[in-house]
Amino acid sequence: MTIKKLKVFNIVLTGILSAGVINMIIKNRYSQSFQLDILMFVALIYLIWALVYHRINKSLTFAIILEYLLTAALVLILLLGIFNI
């Protein structure tokens, strides 16, 4: 895959994932445990996606793993505050 195609693929996949998650959270706004499960699942997908990408790219290091873990944790904390879970 070329770099341009990979960027477009990542943007489209991120958009679809984001739209699906927002839709599921809004539809299940009265089930806080399900909302938390959705957010945790998305964070896990994000981490797997990042690790696979860097593994294929041969640039996977401990610093990159730590960066993605901390980013996922920060986003979870922010979203938990926004959605009042």
Image: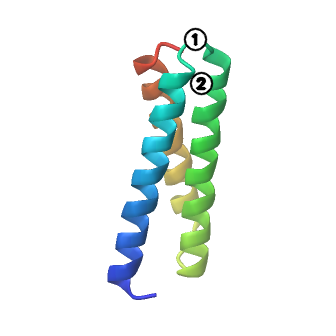
- Which amino acid is tagged 1? Tyr
Q: Looking at the image, which residue sits at the far front?
A: 27
Q: Secondary structure at mark 2?
A: helix
Q: Secondary structure at mark 1?
A: loop
Which disc number belongs to residue 35? 2
Q: Is residue 71 above or below residue 59?
A: above
Q: Position of residue 47 (x, y in %)?
A: 59, 53
Which one is in front, 25 or 47?
A: 25
Callout 1 environment at 10 Å: few (<14), some (14 to 19), or many (20+)? few
- Which amino acid is tagged 2? Gln
Quadrant hosting residue 83 = top left
Coloration of the structure image? rainbow
Which disc number belongs to residue 66? none
Residue 62 visible somewhere in the drawing? no
Q: Position of residue 16 (x, y in %)?
A: 45, 52
Q: Looking at the image, which residue sits at the far bottom?
A: 2
Which one is in front, 78 or 26?
A: 26
Q: CA distance from mark 1 to mark 2?
A: 9 Å
Q: List the residue tagged with mark 1.
A: 30
Left or right: residue 23 compared with residue 11? right
Residue 3 visible somewhere in the drawing? yes
Residue, x 43% and y 43% (percent of image)?
19
Q: Position of residue 9 (x, y in %)?
A: 42, 70
Q: Position of residue 36 (x, y in %)?
A: 62, 25
Q: Quadrant of the C terminus?
A: top right
Residue, x 55% and y 71% (percent of image)?
53
